[in-house]
Amino acid sequence: MPRLGTLTLGWLPLTLLILGVLAVFRIAVLMLADYTLGPDEAQYWAWSTEPAFGYYSKPPMVAWIIAATTSLFGDAEWAVRLGAPLVHTGTALLLYVLGQDLYDRRVGFWSAVVYATGPAVWFSSGLVTTDVPLLFFAALALVAFNRTLTRRSLGWAALFGAAVGLGLLSKYTMLYVPASAFIFLVLSRDDRGMLWSRHGVLAAAVALALIAPNLAWNLQHGLSTVGHTADNFNWGGDLFHPGKLLEFVGAQFGVFGPLLFGFLLFGLVTLRRRRPGRSDRLLLCFVLPLLAVVMAQALLVRAHANWAAPVYVAATVLVVAWAARLPRAWPVIPVSVGLHTLLGLLLAAVLLWPGLAEAVGRGGDFHQVRGWDTIGGAVAAEARRGHHGRPYAAVLTNHRMLHAELLYYARPMPAPLRIWHPEGAPDNHFQLTAPFRGEAEGPVLFATPFTATEVAHVLAHFDAVEELSAVTVATGGKRRLTVRLFALEGYRPPPP
């Protein structure tokens, strides 16, 4: 039994205590820190106000989570982000269960703590992103998959299918889970029969039932989410970029932690020296395929650092189990937890006192979450002012990020907010749902982060153009954000 001072606690109570303290601390930082929603967060919030089974660039789970938290606590920034620390806490608890099931309670405890204090988790606990629910459902799927195999349970098979379906409603990267499960079943002589068993059929049926509404939404909207996801791979340009692969691998030391990722790589490279048992083989099937695919993508074109994030659900338990067998390697685990906790506390301090980031020359790192409230207030004030005594018929933007931020920070907007999209297929959710089509008679307020020369193609469609003002805010370091305002009249649509 682990000891906390003079108090003896079981592994699970100690896990709950540590995760609870971390969750409360992170929520407190959310409530006290002064930083605006980032553009993607503002877009997800906008989605949450219009519940649907799909959106242009992402499945709907992140919007549903925001809708749940804001319905309870209002639309403040901390309430929009509240789901992140709560869901991460749930993921850590699932890794406790997974580590206990595959190894023992000690491995479960350290797996939960390693995950909860990981660099990426510290960072993403302060932002609401699609990766947060993806990791939760990936962990739930792993627990359910293992219990389906060990208990031959239809209930756990149904839960595995539900986790896969809900994970796909979070992010399509969840496809790696059934693919990894398939690879394990093919390689495992004892479990291969589960491929064509009623358990497999039930899991597939549940997953398909849950993802079906999103597939139907995509069919109704030109497969926009599927197409956007495919476009991210960007295979149309030049292929083979070794530098991008090195950049991606380097970024993983920051995502998982320098010691942990180094230890993971060492373990993978030396894998042939030992014969991994069933638990190791299962976790490796949920680590190696996705890691190999994303590294290949990085080599061919490029890959964002977070694309491999689901790997670290299984990898967390795997590295803890490996270290537990090697006394000389074990310090990697507690040292990493301590190092990552210090980094997390530093991040919290920077969020609470922005001057610290400026003092160490890193103020520009936070430019995407600074200044949007000032921009939104200025645009809303001009929209309420009207143009020469006449109310604006619409407020027009030509930039997805600005449009999303105005939806949140320019509330209440006295005129409809529209985005420039005169023709062609939409490039984002707002072009799909709120394109500018001339609106009613009257002046239009145009807000843009570009100069008049850069938006000449927009201004050319209006008979009268008057540049009103520009709003400039400091966003950290030497960075500045400028939004220019124009009054436009006499819209001329493009020729058919």
Image (cartoon, grey):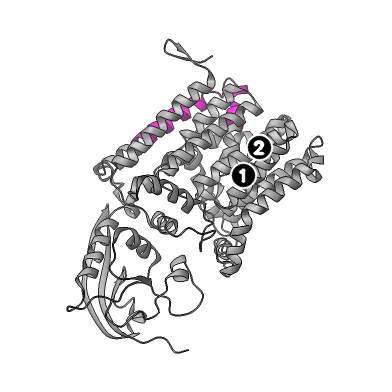
Q: Is residue 309 visible?
A: no
Q: Which mark is residue 435?
A: none
Q: Residue at x 68, y 48 (%)?
A: 206
Q: Is residue 244 above or below residue 455?
A: above
Nearer to us in this view, 276 or 472: 472
Quadrant (top left/top right/bottom left/bottom right) for the N terminus: top right
Q: Is residue 324 magenta?
A: yes
Which residue type does callout 1 highlight? Ala
> Which is the main secondary structure of the residues drawn in magenta?
helix
From the viewer's perspective, tell me whether residue 447 is left or right of residue 42. Answer: left
Which residue type does callout 2 highlight? Ala
Look at the numbered discs 1 and 2 and tell me whether their residues touch, using CB distance below 8 Å: yes
Q: Is residue 321 above or below residue 348?
A: above
Q: Residue at x 32, y 53 (%)?
A: 367
> In the figure, residue 452 lies in which quadrant?
bottom left
Nearer to us in this view, 310 or 88: 88
Describe the element under mark 1 as helix, strand or loop.
Answer: helix
Q: Which residue is mark 1?
A: 163
Please provide percent x and percent y for residue 288.
65, 43
Task: Give the alpha-carbon distance from disc 1 to disc 2, as whole Å.
Answer: 8 Å
Mark 2 Cα-neighbour bin, 10 Å: few <14, some 14–19, many ≥20:
many
Q: Which residue is mark 2?
A: 144
Describe the element under mark 2 as helix, strand or loop.
Answer: helix
